[in-house]
Image: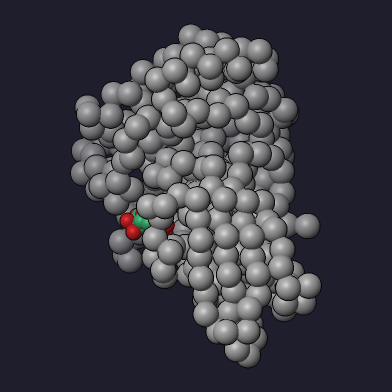
Amino acid sequence: MRQTEEKARAKLNLSLDVLGRMPDGYHEMRMVMQSISLHDQVGIELTDDGAVSVRSNFRFLPVDGRNLAARAAEVFLSAAEVKGAGCRLTLRKRIPVGAGMAGGSTDAAAVLRGLNRLTGTPFTADQLEELARGIGSDVAFCVRGGTQLATGRGDVLRPLAPLPDCHVVVCKPRFSISTPALFQQIDSRRSALHPDTDGPLAALEQGDLTGVARRMYNVFEDVLPRQYDAVSAIKAELLDGGAIGAIMTGTGSAVFGLFARESDAARVRASLRERYRDCFCTTPASFCME
Ligand code: C5P
């Protein structure tokens, strides 16, 4: 087998807390991360020319080493010591860029999983996650997927009970928000209130969708500059339309709501779609590793 297709699922944060700044400048996180069915499709073809190339339907994406998928291929091929091997990557993207949905990280994770299969599984799941940690903080989660408690830089994972079946509406405003800039806002807070992450954890354990949805919290919303008011406006629309809970994911700018009823989710999505191009109805997804 020389080529394969891999689903690269997006992630959402069901809760997100920043515990503090670490000596290396990164931040210590405590977050509940959730895969969703919304995904990019990643085509991976092994070649003998030693080069890594990327094509994508999103014309503005970099196709060199700044693209995390290309970076993942380089890291994998060098670690696996496959002599002379290169690869051609085709990214069919649906996940919006700059949304807090790990679009780049999940493409990178899909490349690691796909290349591992194509080259006769040289790495165990744990080793693949270790490679992922060197590529970006969210990549290890994206290799594994499902519902996980993420601590450390966001790359120390503990599996959680799955989010109960529900419908998810995700909507991204037209702007993106700079991740380093939001971390700086967090650092300059005078007092830090911490959300009750144990609340959603207990609710997940009990299979209690309402309990999870009502306790979702993202501390980055506390420090959002005024120009990003669309985030709270979308949140209000999701809640008015029947979402049990709604928050921003990661450092935004996408906002999502959890719904018990598909008809409510579809109606709100249709209404938001009139003003925001990046609007999706999706569902929670489980484990990515076979
Ligand atoms: O690890 P990654 O390259 O995805 O991180 C992007 C940026 O997000 C980092 O350069 C850093 O500014 C910030 N970050 C952080 N603490 C984390 C994760 C990311 O400060 N735990």
- Tell me the residue at 38%/36% (across/down): 253
Image vertical order of residue 226 relative to residue 89, above or below? above
Give 172 or 250, whichever is nearer the viewer: 172
Image quadrant occupied by the C terminus: bottom right
- Tell me the residue at 30%/61% (across/down): 25
Image vertical order of residue 151 relative to residue 244, above or below? below
Q: Is residue 205 left or right of residue 259?
A: right
Q: Position of residue 4 (x, y in %)?
A: 72, 63
Image vertical order of residue 167 relative to residue 55, above or below? above
Of the four image quadrants, the one with ligand 1 is bottom left
Q: Position of residue 97 (x, y in %)?
A: 43, 45
Q: Is residue 158 left or right of residue 230?
A: right
- Tell me the residue at 67%/17% (across/down): 262
Give 256 or 158, whichever is nearer the viewer: 256
Query: Among all residues in the image, which is located at the extreme bottom?
Result: 83
Image quadrant occupied by the N terminus: bottom right
Q: Position of residue 267 (x, y in %)?
A: 57, 12
- Tell me the residue at 63%/84% (across/down): 48
Q: Position of residue 197 (x, y in %)?
A: 52, 36
Give 81 or 166, whichever is nearer the viewer: 81
Give 166 or 57, whichever is nearer the viewer: 57
Image vertical order of residue 180 relative to residue 66, above or below? above
Q: Is residue 173 left or right of residue 51?
A: left
Is residue 215 in sight in this rendering? no
* Image label count: 0
Query: How are the residues colored?
Result: one colour
- Picture quarter containing residue 14? top right
